[in-house]
Image (cartoon, grey):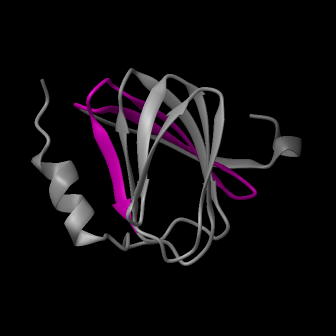
Amino acid sequence: MDDKMGLIDEEIRCDFRGWVKIMRVNKDYLLIFTKKGCKRGGEIHIGWQYNVLIEGQAYWTIGNEKILYKAPALILTLPHMPHMMESITDTLILEWRQYPLEDPVNYYEPFRKIILGKKHE
């Protein structure tokens, strides 16, 4: 892509839930497609996380609070808050964070068990 836009790298990860396209444009942006009924997340980050629900409906659990969002919606996750989402319909989400993607990911095990326990229907 155009060097003026600052696109350094991109990567696509796919599984039964859908796909995640990671774009590095001076910071990490994730474009996430998630199939109806699937879950993602179960992480804790050191900084803010920003999500724009572009299409669809999803439950977002942040800490102990579970909220249904319908596109278009902006979802803000505070630093150090465990979070996960469940697609009620097929969803398309744009995500970015205050800091670069963590490697390794800091998982929140109670939420990860829920996410990994969900089988593809």
- 2 part of magenta stretch: no
Q: In this view, does 44 lie to the left or right of 72?
A: left
Q: Which of 69 and 44 is in front in this view?
A: 69
Estimate the x, y position of residue 102 in percent, counting from the top left.
48, 71
Estimate the x, y position of residue 13 in percent, counting from the top left.
37, 40
Residue under the point 41% across and 40% down:
59
- 20 part of magenta stretch: yes
Position of 13 relative to 96 (above/below) = above
Position of 31 relative to 97 (above/below) = above
Q: Is residue 74 left or right of residue 59?
A: right
Residue under the point 43% across and 34% down:
58
Q: What stretch is highlighted in magenta?
A: 16-43
For the stretch drawn in magenta, the main secondary structure is strand
Residue at far right of view: 4
Q: How many marks?
A: 0
Q: In this view, does 69 lie to the left or right of 18?
A: right
Estimate the x, y position of residue 6 in percent, counting from the top left.
80, 49
- The part of the image, by quadrant, that contains residue 15 is top left
